[in-house]
Image (cartoon, coloured by chain):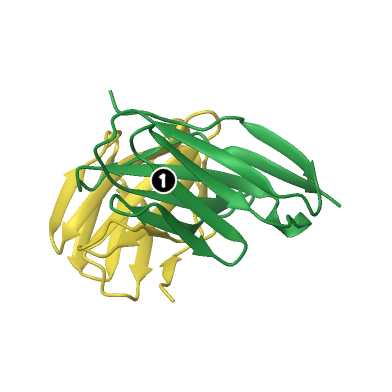
Amino acid sequence: DVKVTQSSRYLVKRTGEKVFLECVQDMDHENMFWYRQDPGLGLRLIYFSYDVKMKEKGDIPEGYSVSREKKERFSLILESASTNQTSMYLCASAPGSVNEQFFGPGTRLTVL
Amino acid sequence: KQEVTQIPAALSVPEGENLVLNCSFTDSAIYNLQWFRQDPGKGLTSLLLIQSSQREQTSGRLNASLDKSSGRSTLYIAASQPGDSATYLCAVNWDSNYQLIWGAGTKLIIKP
């Protein structure tokens, strides 16, 4: 079974802090994704990566950056957290041949 | 514009009934379509992936069909159980790009 893990289930940070969310997958997938999910807005893609050190902006990249130094790990960085970044963050991975995405358990981030 | 629609937004049925969830999409040139399940406060669980060349996929009590010409997919759940209560999301991948376009989901409640 594909396993995607995220570093924290719940996280509380203060405005202005730098926040790191980490995602690890164990299936040697080429593609990894970061989404945020908000009530009424559904899932929105922040960034994705199709290879080590490669990244592409999704629909809402502003205020976020990403890092993929190793194939299995994809990090989402909030350079200076703001209250409007309070959300559920979901990581997913997919093999390069077929875009079948597998999700982690999510991180509920609250920015105070 | 490529869009995915799920109607109804919510559905409540007695335990034991067979039921159908609907997903419609604009533009029939899809690459694949994926059905997910999400429990409250949790990540997404992949249920079924249907490739463009397929008409249906089955997993246990679940059967997903695809009719590209009419822009529709259905998720059939046989002999529903209270444990099936969750939000069901469909997502479409067009032209083998990396992005999924998401429906808003159908919240399913199975009454004991």
Q: Taking A93 as reference, is A96 left or right?
A: left
Q: Quadrant of residue A4?
A: bottom left
Rendered shade, chain A:
yellow
Q: Taking A90 as reference, is B40 left or right?
A: right
Q: Position of residue A77 (x, y in %)?
A: 31, 50
Q: Secondary structure at mark 1?
A: strand
**Figure label count:** 1
Q: In the rendered view, would you say A111 is above or below B61?
A: above
Q: Few, some or many C-alpha atoms within 10 Å of disc 1 (few <14, some 14-19, many ≥20)? A: many
Q: Position of residue B60 (x, y in %)?
A: 59, 67
Residue indicated by mark 1? B66
Q: In the rendered view, would you say A70 is above or below B84?
A: below
The answer to which of A34 and B97 lies nearer the viewer is B97
Numbered disc 1: what chain?
A: B
Q: Residue at x 73, y 55 (%)?
A: B80
Q: Position of residue A74 (x, y in %)?
A: 28, 61
Q: Position of residue B69 (x, y in %)?
A: 33, 34
The answer to which of B12 and A103 lies nearer the viewer is B12
Taking the view exactly as shown, the residue that stands out farthest to the top is B1
| Chain shown in green | B
